[in-house]
Amino acid sequence: MSRGMVFLLIQGIALVAIGVHGVLGLGGVNGADACIGFGGLSLLIVLAALGRREHQAAGNSLWTDAWRRLRKNRMAVACGLVSYAVFLFSFAGPTVARAVAGLDGLTLDVDLGAAPPSLEHWMGTDPLGRDMMVRIMEGGQWAIWAGLTATAVALVIGVAWGAVAGYMGGKTDEVMMRIVDVLYAFPTVVFVIVIMAVFETVSLVVLFALIGAISWLNMARIVRGQVLSLRHREFVEAAHSIGATTPRILARHIVPNTLGPVIVYSTLALPSVMLTEAFLSFLGLGVQAPRASWGTLVTEGASQIAVNPWTLIFPGLIMGITIFALNFLGDGLRDALDPQMRKD
Amino acid sequence: MIRLILGRLATGLIVIFCVATFSFCAQKVAPGGPFDEERPLDPQIMRAFERAYQLDRPWYEQYGQMMRDLVPFCERCDGWQPFLGISFKQHKPVTEIIAHHFPVSVKLGLMALGFAVLFGVGFGVLAAARQNSLGDHASMSFALIGISIPSFVLGPLLIFIFSVQLAWLPPARAEGFASYILPAMTLGLIYMGVIARLSRSGMLETVRQDYIRTARAKGLSERVVVWKHALRLGLMPVVTYLGPAIAGLITGSFVVEKIFQIPGLGFYFVESVVLRDWPLLTGLLIVYSIFLVVLNLLVDISYGLLDPRIRSKR
């Protein structure tokens, strides 16, 4: 296992840990907690980058190659930085805004009402006089929690399902992939809508997990395809011949080798999951007032676009930029990790 | 091939069974009933309602009745058409409501598809013809922006620009061709982006093939090479994407239908969920599922027809 991979794993674990932490504290995502979270994450990323650099001289593993290719793709690097900036904006932003300008997303100022962007309120205020920027930051926190939780759920189910089906082969494979086929024929988002609308008390954690639980099908198919091509390779046979058990072979030899496509598809799943969350909120089924999510902010903005256009434009813009950056980053990662899939 | 079709039809039956069961369970577990009002109804009226919709019978009888009604040519069926119940809110047979509003969704979906294919292929082929030029980067950025703008941001923006400011197009209601333009654009933009990217990469791969070099070598003009020879193979990925695209366009239009107040299936789907109109909801879920099953099957068959190399083993 290369050092690059160790760092990658640490980052993954940190991300999941932050996700879990956030989900448990979803009652009110605390600014200070979030600061610690993102501080730790950025530290890890810096460490990982340093580790990579040190490592680069040593050898030419898949990961160092990929990292080099990714860094040459300026647009992908820029989009990575933008995604990171949105992360900082959402999690550190509210704390900074409170400390520096005394703004928070909940204080009403009905006398002020809806004011266009000004020096005091950079993105204007909504009709109740709440600062739009802080509300967009808080909406960003929900979007990111939703994205991380749902992607993590999809990742775990999809990888496990695909790896087992691909490795066992035969009847097991047949049955497991048939189940995926059946689920594929379900209009899944429609089901989430039904569940959310019907059980009004469902918590947001359940909502995010539900979104994840409908997003694993593609992941399972991709992983299965990878595993099918891996399972007859020499190193698997070698592991088998020294008496390694099936779970061990899966966990140590097969799954780590599927990480490349898995990372790519997780990155690409993030924006689509964020969109799902936002449009459930748009339909009034996701995050509820007084909490702000990008979906609810856009809904509010859409209803008053003729009078206060900034209440739609800013949340829409930030959301569009985030999704654009993540999509582009995912493309860049695919080019870097899998040069054969490169689309020129 | 026949095995594939039979297998998929069997899957479809399982799906319909599961969907109906899911909907029935949700109905029995969910809090709040279809006849809840601000003021509680008189118990006697409530009982009359329940009797009229057969909600006073034990749950297993209701479930059995629902399943029997789904089989074609059943006693309450209209010929082969299954009996999907009477809507709690509109007091009309569900099949009638669906038959009335399905064409609206299909029309919207097909217009969006036309928009997406026309502009997507156009941008993609132009980008591929001048790879790495400014035009290439511009159209690919546009495609990616299209993928990244959620429909519920784009819809209100388009209404604001084209209906409120410029007053060119009607903002809502499905009356006439013009009123479908904005919704179709809103719905189709994401698919346009995907198609543009698919056709660009497909074309780039194709122009490297030997037969293209041959075409160029025998002195054909660049336009004929690109539009006649390369396009056929280069658009294969787009053709295979059409199935999922149509499915997404027709079953995923509820946001757009809500924004533009279009009386299609998506609009009534959201309504039926909010109003607890269970027969209509179940019917819509079943229609959506059948639609997806059939479309997936068509896609698989077309794979086999278009490219003999990937004939499905199943």
Image (spheres, coloured by chain):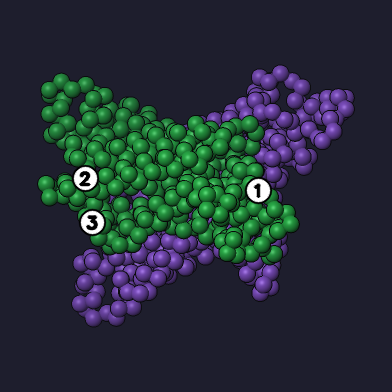
Q: Residue at x 66, y 25 (%)?
A: B28
Chain for numbered disc 1: A
Residue holding disc 1:
A107
Camera-nearest residue between B244 and B142: B142
Give residue B96's position: percent from left, percent from top: 71, 45
Give residue A176's position: percent from left, percent from top: 37, 30
Q: Residue at x 23, y 81 (%)?
A: B219
Vertical arrangement, residue A285 with respect to residue B202, above or below: above
Q: Colour of chain B?
A: purple
| Amino acid marked by disc 2 | Gly
Which chain: green?
A: A
Vertical arrangement, residue A251 with respect to residue A294, above or below: above
What number is the disc on residue A69?
Answer: 3
* Disc 3 with disc 1 on a shared chain: yes
| Amino acid marked by disc 1 | Thr
Q: Find out whether the residues at labels 3 and 2 contact each other: C-beta distance under 8 Å.
A: no
Quarter of the image with the N terminus of chain B is top left
What number is the disc on residue A51?
Answer: 2
